[in-house]
Amino acid sequence: MPVTGIRNKMHFLQLSDVSVGYPAGRGTKVVQSALSLTAEEGELIALIGKNGCGKSTLLRSIACLQPILQGSLLLKGENLWEISHRRRAKLLSVVLTEQQSVASFTVRELISIGRDPYTGWLGSLSEKDNRIIDEAIGMTYLNGFEHRNIHELSDGERQRVFIARALAQDTPVILLDEPTSHLDLPNRINILLLLQKLARETGKTIFISTHELETAMQVADKLWLMEKEKGVNVGIPEDMVLNGVFDRVFQHPSYEFDKEYGSFVVQKLLDKSIATRVQHPGSLMARWTTKALTRKGFRISATAPVGLQVDEERRCWVVSCEDESVVAHSIGEALQQISRFMG
């Protein structure tokens, strides 16, 4: 008996032959065309790519903040451009970078605005509305902040408030444009981890456009890696590393993608040489010593006049030249002694 597959599967969100762009002069600038993409419930999807590839344009088009130029955009089989604004507001919620500038609301007042599609601007909040707002506050770790003015918060705290407002809107899809662009490193990581947690625990489909490629690779379920005017590469981060997509898309003479560590490595000018002796080449001491040497422009050569030994048992570095040797107790000290020997 032949085995048959499932035909005509309805994806949660489906873009079919979509082109996106924006007005430019008297015409329209098309930034991506003929895109056919899908997303499923509970996925955290990161839109990544170089500047100008169309990340924000595509995100805003999915959010119906600007029209698609051709094609169809379906959510659970509904065409998002053929439904009312009120109905759409119950399906899509959006967090934009420019929303950092808002009126002088308290945290709870701003989050409560997320209930507008259900109550109207002049509507009163029901018991259900308040329960949903409380849940959004709890999920974004804002308990105790409810009565603080939004302008009294840090950038990271304020961004959590905007995410909480989107959660209070209770839509199956949340779209965030550069949600970490104003934040320091700890807050950037915390926001991305929060979004990963929300996608897993709420089953919502969450889209983010971001430049945080290395962090996005660690939290996103799927990447939409965009190339300028060349479409979108789709896959899980690990597959995209192994199949060489990052190598190709981000190829540049100044840096390269390190497949082993999943990070970008700056290509340095190595115009000096040093001989090294290491007990355990893969150890932490050896690795960071090598990083320091390449940063200072050294390549490893067995015939170099100056040598460096990494002594892990004594936790020190021994710099030698001809009959003289000096013990250093940090990489910084070792670099100073190498510079002295090299004149």
Image (cartoon, rainbow, N blue to C red):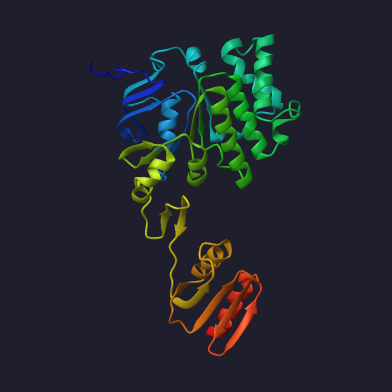
- Which of the 4 quarters of the picture holds residue 337? bottom right
Residue 234 lies, in percent from the top left, at 37, 36
On the image, the x and y values in percent for residue 54 come to: 39, 38
Depth check: 124 or 315 in front?
Answer: 315
Asked if residue 274 is positioned above or below residue 169 in the image, the reply reads below
Q: Quadrant for residue 243, please give it.
A: top left
The picture quadrant where one finds residue 131 is top right
In this orientation, does residue 99 appear? no
Residue that extends furthest to the front in the rendered view of this protein? 1
Q: Give percent across and percent down for residue 100.
A: 60, 35
Q: Quadrant of the C terminus?
A: bottom right
Q: Nearer the viewer, residue 265 or 147?
A: 265
| 94 on left or right of 162 | left
Residue 179, placed above or below residue 67? below
Q: Residue at x 58, y 83 (%)?
A: 340
Please count the marks in the image: 0
- Residue for point 56% across, 14% down: 117
* Residue nearest the viewer, comparing 20 with 233: 233
Position of 80 with respect to 200 (left or right) is left
Q: Residue furthest bottom?
A: 323
User: How far across and how far down the image is residue 126, in percent?
Assistant: 68, 9
